[in-house]
């Protein structure tokens, strides 16, 4: 294997030598490629995705088509690789790692091909951005697969040596220069002249010090097999002569020592440096003094230095004359050398600091080409600037490479001379290339400044805002006392400026805040660069929008018909249930009183999305957002925007999207409006148009205002543990301005998902007190409490937003109950105010439940039910219907904030970027100059209700027999039943023992009594107990309501034997069988197919249920049946009707009529003997007794016969 290096000296910054000869170095290697690399489509994928990003950035048409093409190419390339890999899978000479890696690659690429096909079918115009993120994941996976786990071929190192010292190097991966006859498997840089940048070796090469290029080399590299050596010069630019060496021993084909190019082309490079934006802040002021250095071939030039800006507009033309390039003209036209542009920050003391680097290729014009459309003059383009691996801004420039022919430079397109005498010999960008300018007016809304930090240990007292764009600008009014009132006295100012007609080329707008101090000194507080002005461009309203009122009216009609049909269906269901009750049929569910519903019913129904609570369908639900309300409504920047002010040097963060909070020194609140002059007279002629306010008509005043803030904290989830036991003791802290509420005494012990259910009231004055902080702290017995996390809410933006985020619009208007209207203004008042502010015609209420607003007609109910149940006529429902569809109103409509719950992340300043949990909450705001709102909604956590479950164990049947009788060998069991509620195992209860059951039948008549606390809404039992004897507080647990019944075989001299069990979910368990024969194993195996009941609705149920256990094959088997009766009572009912445990008073149960076999040997041994011996062996005993009597008679006969015979013989 050969590795060929053709090194040409192009622009070495150290020695500056240049010539037309090339040094050739070759290395011979016999290493074998282990397997083909994954060079399927990585480069093409990158190019395709860059194209899609550019199309989206420049807002060109059909980005979805290009993305579909990229996915199609990816899918095809992956499938082709899998096909080729299957053929070569069994080749010899591969290690186990190679084989396994090839299999892994095949699996990954096969999966990637399928996913690419699926995503391709889902790509739409509105989903391009989301799908683009997924495709970038494919790119990362491809890069991972392309990297080898072991270096089968070593990489190539190029060293620059001076005075026998290694001063710079470059490392080139061998896979990038690997040759293959298959284009898809060839290295991306193989057989190409490539620019290589040398960097410092060792630790010096890491960090900002290593980002500066030490030297640039133009190199041609080729790495291939020995049999492919004839192709090693095939990629070189043509027009060279080889200087070959003599053949050595063992070398079949020697590469040339050097290459001599006879063809030389002379060019002129024109670098049109227009502007840059969003550069790296290199100075402590948060700004930079940037200039650009352009490298091409052996030449370099710099632009002028612009002071204190992150968005410089150089508008400068750099001309490189007599640039000599080697090779054929056609090849240079198609593939010219790259241009390196480096940006630096000029410092008064020391070296210039590196800001970033970008690369570009010039547009080449040969002598025989015409300088004109469509290729020339070149258009300005954006080039991404990188600082290390991070993006560091954009450069707007154009580059053209013009060939100088025999006529010399006179034949080149003319260069316009300097137009600005102040700039000296600096050439501006020519008119054909610089953008076409138009006159614009930029109106600036100066609202106020917030949270300004100290500058040089001194507080900011008299700040001012300076606005600058394209050399023009305006200054705000001076804030005389920042502490007393941080708002500006003059709201709107404007200035005119010449800007490009192409919106993508608009220069950035710079916002600077300075503090006016004594003796005429001005200190920079902070700055902000608005890189894109497109969202601030004014667009006149579309007057044809009023024509679609009829269509939406139809939608509105359909909506209400749908609702009323649902309601009528519910009423029909209720009537059916009533008829069933009259006929005596059993109805499973009871209709609860709506007065039993509370705020939590509404909340849980919102989470479950129309969940059935207590048999009643909750239609009045909240909008529960799983994110911040600001994310849903564009940060409430519909007309008032917040601009962060930065100061200080930017950090070299790997993730450039992360905002460096340490650099934020305050916030500027205001807005911008930009439009092309002259403005249409129709706008200025509108009634009530105030010329002093410009386009910011009908905005509220910014005078201080007193507001009542009501904060509702529902619960927190997934809190980060703060104690060594892995739990936390959280409580809430509210801060607003100088006010602070610490709810420390109501901390919740040992919980990571606490339910707070709290509301807090704070009075505040906008704008001085507008940043609300909700923090969750961990309570500690000893030491200071620890911050778990906090979230901050800008209340001012919410208060003034057109989305009306002061108090959410409820889905229904009600004057009583859990869904009572909580806004101090009724819907009719809110609608009238909105119509007045928007200068709309209406509202006009008409008969038949109609209301007309701005030529729109809405329908809705007109009756309301009061607390006594009487129905009255009202217009509130009609007004509420319009409010809920306010976004459909032409020109002024926007979505109004509904009644909602928002979920906000909790962050800790000591752990930036890491979420410490989430908190569910909402905020209401009420101005103090209007009637006071009603009392806060009671959202306190539901207290569990006390219940008592009475379980009577009547009988058992078919219980498996475990014991063998000692005397008789018969099977029997000493049966007893054990029961408990889940979570209360320590309170388990046992029946008495039914001894010596020979048939599995047991008779008990035994009562269990289980008192417990139950949360109906969550269907959980609540248990409070200390975790250990050292615990300070009781810990609350919520567990499912489940009753466990077990059957056991009692043993006296060993542990009892477990026979089987049944677990009943008290909210959903199968109805018991009426007889023991009907009770089967299917009641457990097919539980989900059987009708179920809830003890909380049924209250009392009796039946047979099976006991089950797992056999040796881990399958369920039937081990018995139990007849039980479950009776649920509330604590009040249980107190009125007490019962005893077991068969005790009060209300004792009868003793069971057990057979004689159920007696113990020790208690009644005679009865036990009588039953077990006489009952089973009586005939044998009778026979034995008869035989014994016979033997006795025979013995007596034999005993008495001799004396009787003697007497007879003697005659006695």
Image (cartoon, rainbow, N blue to C red):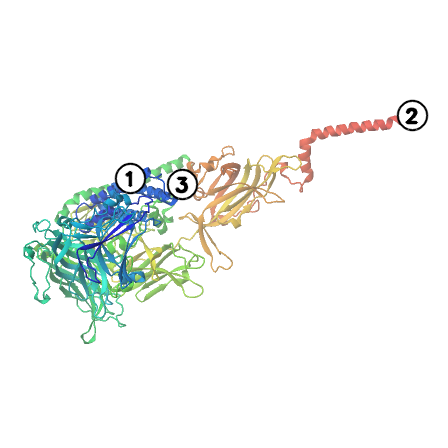
Numbered mark located on residue 1207 in the image:
2
Task: Give the spatial CA distance, label 3 vs label 2.
Answer: 101 Å
Residue 804 can be seen in this image = no
Task: Measuring from the top left, give residue 387's x and y in whole percent.
Answer: 25, 59
- The residue lying furthest to the bottom in this view is 519
Numbered mark located on residue 409 in the image:
none
Task: Measuring from the top left, give residue 1103's x and y in whole percent.
Answer: 49, 37
Which is in the foreground here, disc 3 or disc 2? 2
Which is in the foreground here, disc 1 or disc 3? 1
Vertically, is 268 above or below 590?
A: below
Task: Measuring from the top left, give residue 1033's x and y in whole percent.
Answer: 47, 59
Mark 3 near mark 2, Cβ–Cβ under 8 Å?
A: no
Mark 3 or 2 closer to N-term?
3
The one nearer the camera, 446 or 141, is 141
The one nearer the camera, 655 or 1184, is 655
Numbered mark located on residue 79 in the image:
1
In the picture of the structure, the residue carrying the numbered disc 3 is: 589
The kind of secondary structure element at disc 2 is: helix
């Amino acid at each position: 294997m050969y590795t060929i290096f053709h090194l040409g000296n192009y622009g070495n910054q150290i020695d500056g030598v240049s010539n037309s000869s090339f040094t050739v170095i070759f290395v011979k290697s016999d290493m074998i490629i282990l397997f083909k690399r994954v060079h399927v489509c990585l480069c093409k994928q990158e190019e395709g995705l860059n194209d899609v990003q550019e199309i989206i950035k420049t807002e060109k048409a059909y980005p979805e088509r290009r993305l579909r093409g990229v996915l199609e190419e990816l899918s095809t390339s992956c499938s082709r690789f899998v096909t080729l890999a299957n053929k070569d899978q069994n080749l010899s000479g591969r290690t186990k790692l190679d084989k396994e890696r090839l299999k892994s690659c095949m699996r990954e690429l096969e999966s990637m091909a399928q996913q690419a096909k699926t995503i391709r079918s889902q790509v739409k115009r509105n989903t391009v951005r989301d799908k683009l993120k997924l495709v970038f994941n494919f790119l990362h996976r491809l890069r991972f697969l392309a990297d080898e786990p072991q270096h089968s071929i070593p990489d190539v190192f190029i060293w620059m040596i001076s005075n026998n010292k290694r001063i710079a190097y470059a490392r080139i991966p061998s896979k990038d220069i690997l040759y293959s006859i298959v284009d898809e498997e060839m290295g991306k840089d193989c057989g190409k002249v490539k620019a290589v940048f040398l960097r410092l070796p060792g630790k010096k090469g890491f960090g900002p010090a290593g980002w500066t290029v030490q030297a640039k080399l133009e190199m041609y590299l080729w790495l291939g097999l020995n049999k492919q050596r004839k192709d090693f010069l095939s990629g070189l630019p043509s027009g060279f002569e080889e200087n070959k060496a003599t053949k050595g021993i063992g070398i079949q084909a020697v590469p040339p020592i050097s290459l001599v190019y006879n063809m030389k082309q002379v060019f002129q490079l024109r670098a049109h440096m227009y502007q840059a934006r969003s550069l790296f802040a290199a100075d402590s002021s948060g700004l930079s003094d940037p200039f650009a250095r352009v490298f091409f071939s052996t030449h370099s030039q710099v632009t002028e230095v612009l002071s204190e800006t992150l968005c410089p507009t150089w508008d400068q033309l750099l001309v490189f004359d007599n640039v000599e390039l080697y090779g054929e003209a056609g090849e240079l036209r198609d593939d010219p050398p790259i241009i390196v542009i480096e940006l630096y920050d000029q410092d008064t003391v020391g070296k210039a600091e590196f800001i970033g680097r970008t690369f570009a290729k010039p547009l080449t014009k040969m002598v025989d080409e015409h300088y004109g459309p469509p290729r020339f003059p070149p258009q300005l383009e954006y080039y991404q600037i990188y600082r290390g691996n991070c993006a560091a801004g954009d450069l707007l420039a154009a580059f053209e490479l013009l060939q100088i022919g025999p006529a010399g430079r006179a034949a080149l397109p003319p260069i316009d001379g300097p137009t600005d005498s102040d700039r000296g010999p600096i050439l501006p960008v020519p008119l054909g290339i610089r953008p076409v300018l138009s006159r614009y007016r930029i109106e600036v809304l100066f609202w106020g400044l917030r949270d300004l930090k100290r500058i040089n240990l001194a507080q900011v007292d008299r700040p001012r805002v300076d606005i600058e764009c394209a050399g023009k600008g305006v200054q705000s009014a001076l804030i005389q006392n920042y502490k007393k009132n941080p708002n500006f006295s003059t709201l709107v100012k404007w200035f005119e400026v010449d800007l490009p007609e192409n919106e993508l080329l608009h220069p950035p707008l710079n916002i600077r805040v300075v503090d006016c101090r004594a003796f005429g000194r001005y200190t920079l507080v902070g700055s902000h660069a608005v890189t894109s002005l497109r969202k601030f461009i004014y667009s006149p309203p579309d007057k044809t929008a009023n024509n679609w009122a009829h269509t939406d009216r139809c939608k509105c009609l359909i909506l209400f018909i749908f609702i009323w049909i649902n309601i009528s269906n519910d009423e029909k269901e209720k009537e059916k249930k009533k008829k069933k009750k009259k006929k005596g049929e059993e109805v499973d569910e009871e209709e609860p009183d709506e007065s039993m519903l509370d705020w939590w019913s509404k909340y849980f129904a919102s989470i479950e999305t129309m969940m059935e609570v207590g048999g009643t369908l909750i239609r009045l639900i909240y909008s529960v957002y799983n994110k911040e309300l600001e994310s849903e409504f564009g940060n409430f920047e519909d007309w008032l925007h917040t601009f962060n002010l930065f100061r200080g040097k930017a950090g070299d963060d790997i993730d450039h999207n992360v905002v460096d909070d340490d650099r934020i020194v305050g916030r500027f609140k205001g807005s911008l409006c930009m439009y092309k002059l002259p403005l249409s007279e129709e706008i200025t002629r509108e009634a009530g148009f105030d010329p002093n306010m410009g386009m910011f008509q009908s905005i509220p005043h910014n005078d201080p205002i007193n507001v009542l803030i009501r904060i509702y904290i529902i619960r927190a989830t997934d809190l980060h543990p703060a104690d060594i036991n892995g739990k936390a003791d959280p409580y809430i802290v509210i801060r607003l301005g100088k006010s602070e509420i610490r709810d420390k005494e109501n901390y919740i012990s040992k919980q990571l998902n606490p339910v707070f259910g709290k509301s807090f009231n704070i009075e505040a004055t906008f704008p001085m007190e507008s940043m609300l902080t909700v923090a969750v702290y961990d309570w500690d017995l000893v030491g200071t409490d620890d911050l778990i996390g906090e979230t901050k809410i800008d209340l001012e933006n919410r208060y003034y937003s057109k989305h009306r985020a002061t108090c959410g619009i409820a889905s229904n208007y009600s004057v009583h109950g859990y869904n009572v209207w909580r806004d101090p203004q009724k819907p009719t008042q809110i609608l009238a105010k909105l119509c007045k502010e928007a200068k709309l015609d209406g509202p006009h209420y008409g008969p038949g439940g109609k209301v007309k607003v701005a030529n729109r007609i809405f329908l809705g109910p007109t009756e309301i039910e009061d607390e006594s149940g009487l129905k009255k006529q009202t217009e509130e429902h009609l007004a509420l219907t319009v409010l809920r569809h306010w976004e459909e109103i032409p020109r002024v409509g926007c979505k109004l904030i509904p009644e909602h719950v928002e979920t906000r992340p909790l962050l800790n300043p000591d752990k930036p970027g890491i979420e410490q949990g989430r908190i569910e909450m909402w905020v209401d705001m009420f101005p103090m100059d209007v009637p006071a709102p009603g009392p806060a909604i009671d959202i306190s956590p539901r207290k569990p209700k006390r219940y008592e479950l009475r379980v009577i164990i009547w009988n058992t049947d078919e219980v498996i027999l475990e014991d063998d009788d000692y005397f008789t060998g018969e099977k029997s069991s000493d049966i007893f039943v054990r029961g408990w509620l889940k979570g209360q195992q320590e309170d388990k209860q046992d029946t008495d023992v039914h001894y010596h059951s020979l048939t599995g039948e047991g008779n008990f008549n035994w009562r269990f009594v289980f008192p417990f606390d139950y949360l109906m809404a969550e269907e959980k039992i609540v248990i409070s107990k200390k975790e250990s004897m050292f615990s300070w507080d009781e810990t609350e647990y919520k567990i499912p309501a489940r009753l466990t019944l077990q059957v056991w075989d009692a043993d006296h001299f060993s542990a009892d034997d477990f026979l089987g069990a049944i677990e009943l979910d008290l909210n959903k368990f199968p109805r018991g069988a009426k007889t023991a024969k009907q009770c089967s194993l299917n009641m457990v195996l097919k539980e989900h197919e059987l009708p179920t009941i809830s003890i909380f609705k049924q209250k009392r149920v009796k039946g047979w249920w099976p006991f089950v256990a797992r056999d040796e094959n881990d399958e369920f088997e039937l081990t018995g049946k139990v007849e039980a009766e479950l009776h649920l009572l509330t604590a009040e009912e249980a107190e009125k009707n007490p019962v005893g445990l077991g068969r005790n008073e009060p209300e004792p149960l009868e003793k069971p009529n057990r057979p004689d076999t159920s007696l113990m040997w020790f208690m009644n041994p005679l009865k036990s003997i009588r039953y077990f011996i006489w009952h089973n062996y009586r005939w044998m005993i009778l026979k034995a007794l008869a035989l014994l009597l016979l033997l006795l008679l025979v013995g007596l006969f034999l005993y008495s016969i001799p004396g009787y015979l003697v007497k007879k013989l003697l005659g006695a």
